[in-house]
Amino acid sequence: MILLFDVGNTNISIGLSDGKLVNETFRLNTEVTKTSDEYYIAMKSLIDMKAIHAVAISSVVPRITEKLKDIANRFLNLEPLIVGPGVKTGVNVKTDNPREVGADLICGAVAVEFTTTPVLVVDLGTAIKYIYVKNKTILGVIITPGVSISIKALVGNTALLPDIDIEVPKKVLGTNTIHCMQSGVTYGVASQVDGLIERIREEVKEDFSVILTGGLSQTIAPLCKHELSRDPNLVLKGLLNIFNRNQILDK
């Protein structure tokens, strides 16, 4: 089995693959203070580590990347593929500084590389990323604060607002503090997604499909007015494609 890691600032998404499909997924909290030994113990309770023959990592948290690489080296006797400079992705990046584009954005774009029409990938993570992909090329990106960041900023900078769970209230207009805040971070994000879809369409002057991914996609997708699809494992699928491409090139 191939062990796949999508490391974000809030969560580590873990996938198990037979080389063709992402068969199982797990999620751990991103905790930079944890040692590689502690992460390995947590993984052993979820995964048969003896069945792993390869490891691939997409990460935006360098300190976690090093811990996962240490796990692969010490416990699995494997050298992981880490998405970064020198790794063949098959996707072109038409931005001012291509090396600044995060591994998660690259993997999201690779996952839709064989789509014949343009695609807008909306990754609802710690930050919300909008990745416009056409003809295996990233043509532009939008990055906005994610739901968790918005809540922390709101609670941390106001004296009387409480911390809240991310749930969708029954009405857009709240009548108590918690529902008012929940409406802002759920319906508000859905409205942002709808609004940016419209603005991007005006700018690119062409139609495109929209795919939502990320931890909160299940919550936000039903609230959006535009037609879209959802794939919670999109980044892991892109990472698997990158792994397979580099295995072929190495042979």
Image (tube, rainbow, N blue to C red):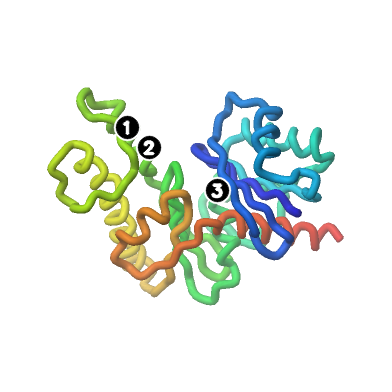
The kind of residue tagged 3 is: Val
| 225 to 55, vertically: above or below | below
- Displayed quadrant of residue 41: top right
> Callout 2: few (<14), some (14-19), or many (20+) C-alpha neighbours within 10 Å?
some
Q: Which of 100 and 190 is in front in this view?
A: 190
Q: Quadrant of the N terminus?
A: bottom right
Q: Which amino acid does label 2 sit on?
A: Ile
Is the Cβ of the residue at disc 3 closer than 8 Å to that at disc 2? no
Mark 3 vs mark 1, foreground winner is: 1
Question: Which mark is nearer the camera, 3 or 2?
Answer: 2
Q: Give the farthest residue toward the front.
A: 45
x and y percentages locating residue 96 in the rendered image: 51, 51
Q: Which amino acid does label 1 sit on?
A: Ala
Residue lying at 71% horizontally and 49% vertically, measured from the top left:
3
Q: Mark 3 points at which residue?
A: 101
Q: Nearer the viewer, residue 237 or 205?
A: 237
Please, what secondary structure does the residue beneath circle 3 have? loop
Measured as percent of width and height from the top left, residue 218 is found at 41, 56
Return the residue nearer the eye: 26 or 142. Answer: 26
Callout 2: SS: helix
Choose between 74 and 137: the one closer to the eye.
Answer: 74
Pointer 2 residue: 149
Q: Any mark on residue 162, and which? A: none
Q: Where is residue 227 in the image (x, y as percent from the top left)?
A: 36, 70
Distance in Å between CA atoms under marks 3 and 1: 25 Å
Which circle's residue, 3 or 1, is located before the other in the chain?
Answer: 3
> What residue does disc 1 label?
153
